[in-house]
Image: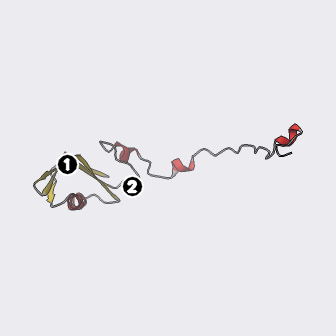
Amino acid sequence: MGVYTFVCKKSGAEWSAKQHDGDLECSADSEHNLTKQLVQTALNSGDSGAVQSSFSYITPSSAVAQVIIGGAVAASFVGDGAAAAAAPSGGAAAAEAPKEEKKPEKEESEDEDMGFSLFD
């Protein structure tokens, strides 16, 4: 599993991104195109599997982008990607879910037990 975090900055009409802990860099004319290029750049680095990406603005001209390759696709973004590493990779947790207990049903009309009815 690969987690790639990028610091993104906008200068004029162009966005540029540099990997936080690494050598990967790219630039594009919009944040959407930048995200697509970041995903492609991360895939070219050798990791394979499901891809998840996020782009979060810090200010109007700066952002943080993250690309996660492999691992659990349903993991949510947590500042440092810890949720992706901690997410279960199998169905064992779902199989061990506690069973729902059935509660006894109440009688529909309890006013009959009192000897009178509200509609009499």
110 vs 82, left or right, is: right
Q: 45 or 120: nearer the eye?
A: 120
Local crowd size for mark 1, using a 10 Å CA cut-off: few (<14), some (14–19), many (≥20)? few
Look at 53% across and 50% down and name the residue there. 94
Q: Residue furthest left?
A: 12
Q: 93 or 55: nearer the eye?
A: 55
Where, quadrant-wise, is the C terminus in this rendering? top right
Q: How many marks?
A: 2
Q: 22 or 112: nearer the eye?
A: 112
Q: Mark 2 — residue?
A: 73
**Quick check: can you spot residue 22?**
yes
Look at 12% across and 58% down and name the residue there. 13
Secondary structure under the numbered disc 1 in the rendered image: loop
Q: Give percent across and percent down for residue 7.
A: 19, 47
Look at 47% across and 52% down and name the residue there. 90
- The numbered mark, 1 or 2, whose residue comes first in the sequence reads 1
Q: Amino acid at mark 2?
A: Val
| Circle on res. 104 | none
83 vs 35, left or right, is: right
73 vs 32, left or right, is: right
Q: Amino acid at mark 1?
A: Pro
Q: Mark 1 — residue?
A: 60
Q: Give percent across and percent down for residue 40.
A: 23, 62
Tell me how far mark 1 sits from mark 2, CA to CA: 28 Å
